[in-house]
Amino acid sequence: MSRPRIVIVGAGFAGYRTARTLSRMTRGRAHVTLLNPTDYFLYLPLLPQVAAGVLEPRRVTVSLSDSLPDVRLVLGEADRIDLDGQTLHYTGPEGEGGTLTYDRLVLAAGSVNKLLPIPGVAEYAHGFRGLPEALYLRDHVTRQVELAAAADDPKSCAARCTFVVVGAGYTGTEVAAHGQMFTDAQVRKHPLRQGMRPRWMLLDVAPRVLPEMDEKLSTTADRVLRQRGVDVRMGTSVKEATPEGVVLTDGEFVETRTLVWCVGVRPDPLVESLGLPMEKGRLLVDPHLQVPGRPELFACGDVAAVPDLDKPGSYTPMTAQHAWRHGKVAAENVAASLGLGGTRKAYRHRDLGFVVDLGGAKAAANPLGVPLSGVPAGAVTRGYHLAAMPGNRVRVAADWLLDAVLPRQAVQLGLVRSWSVPLDTSSPELARVPGGPERRQEESARSGPGAAIAADTHDGGTGAGSSQGGAGEEPAKGQPGSRATQDRPGSGTAQRRSEEELAKGRPGAGPARNWPTDEPAKGPVGGGSAKGHLGAESAKGRSGGESARSQAGGEPPKGQSGGEPARNQPGGEPAKGQPGGEPARNQPGGEPARNQPGGEPAKNQPGPTPQPPADQPPPGPDTAPGPVKRSDAPDDSAKGDS
């Protein structure tokens, strides 16, 4: 008799707990498969400490393969579920498709950023749902303080040192509290020229901080934030986001380069495609976490509307505590439905209280209903997190100890760019990469207006990433399917110089303007590459929005052998039509490239191998890369196309 197949979608709090419990209960009597975009479980409550430099990123992650040895891990994102055929279709991390068949399916896909119809928010704000977003915010805040310290203009300095957080819930409150401490520590070591102090603003339309929690917790958190210097404004939110700042609902305009969106979350849009009864975007289930009429389908965590048996007519809230407990009950009920042990159980919960980490020794907590503040609350909060984490406890405790006795390292690693973490996405746990396998059409429909293609083709953030970019950045302007990049706060020409000037002259960076090879021959089919792009022109026939395959980090264009950069061009391919460059893309027969005597045959047509000028040494393994010496006079008419 074959073993039953159990597939779990998502490895958040609910999915991870389900997989771990099923692994222990089935003991090899069932095939348990876990589908997740990443190979780790993320402990979300400690993510603000990653953004503030208290914890290193890997401290809040737990390896799925190591902690779930009897569970098969499949990397990918679910695309479509065939309920009648009991199959699940997914896309892997390198764009490959796959199919999983199941006897029992547990949906625990989690949640994504919640968007509101506010102009400019999708373009200029960043969420806080995944590790890439936390790493981006840490770099961005560090960069803004460093640029403010070097700025001569007091207005620019004040804008860079103003950080706006929208949403005074659990996440937003902790981000503002830790952020103020982080920037204050930076300024103490490197004071701003104008004697300014970083300003953090916390906005929410609710009447108080932490509106969903006990009022005593709210009062404690509000007092600590105000004492620390956070500008807390209740009953106020953002009316419009612009490149220069935000317009508040009370009419005030706040100049800023940082807008952090912590308004809330919504269930993963995957469940909407099932055509089953929903409750505010969540899949309706019975108290046993089973979908009515579908005995093989279970759901738990943020995607499931689980009846609250202690409050008839309501559903359990979307919190990590409930998701963790959902996972255990779902696993027991799945095992019981397969006859692998245990009995079916209805989900009931008892509120054990909440903890809110406010940075340093400050916290607000009410364990078992007992309100605490100050150092006792801080001790309870950290003890709770250590007990709740499924791994890395010693490393987390060691980082806390080191943070208490040593100064934090405020450095930019530059690992995540602004356009890599768009706010409007169905995959906040994944950073976008140039030429990556994005499910554009499906994600556009799943993630809201213009999510997939627009986020992949423009700098969707505030103050990081160049709008014209360099190697490995967003696609060039004018590529098929891409849209013109808009100016972002901190990404204008003058504001970009601090980042882009550092890259000039380095291998792989944009070619310096005084290089002879800076200007490509005029008129290649498909348009010239954008300024500073190395090989940024899109390959012919590519679908809209995808980065050119010749960009750093992407695949080579079709027809090129392996996509190697030209030997005589540092870091990228030479300009088309120049000696050693790629043959011009013309009609069969090889129309000559403009301004080149005789031209070169069309791409993919046999022709003579281009040779360097007579006074240029032939390329070879012992020849150092350098600019190609042109044998013809530069064409001034090509200026502006490079």
Image: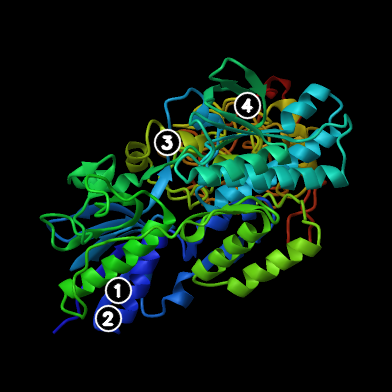
For the residues bearing labels 2 and 1, Cβ distance under 8 angstroms: yes
Q: Earlier in the sequence, mark 4 or mark 1?
A: 1
Q: Is residue 509 visible?
A: no
Nearest to N terminus: mark 3 or mark 2? 2
> Could you tell me how far apart the alpha carbons at marks 3 and 2 are, in whole angstroms?
40 Å
Q: What's the amino acid at mark 4?
A: Lys
Mark toward the viewer: 4 or 3? 3
Q: Which mark is residue 522?
A: 4
The residue at 32%/44% (across/down) is 269
- Which residue is farthest front? 370
537 relative to 639, above or below: below
Name the residue beneath numbered marker 3.
451
The residue wearing badge 2 is: 26
- Residue 325, above or below 342: above
Q: Residue 69: image x %, image y %?
A: 41, 79
Q: Is residue 509 left or right of residue 514?
A: left
User: Image point 37% across, 57% down: which residue?
Assistant: 322
Residue placed most toward the observer, 378 or 411 = 378
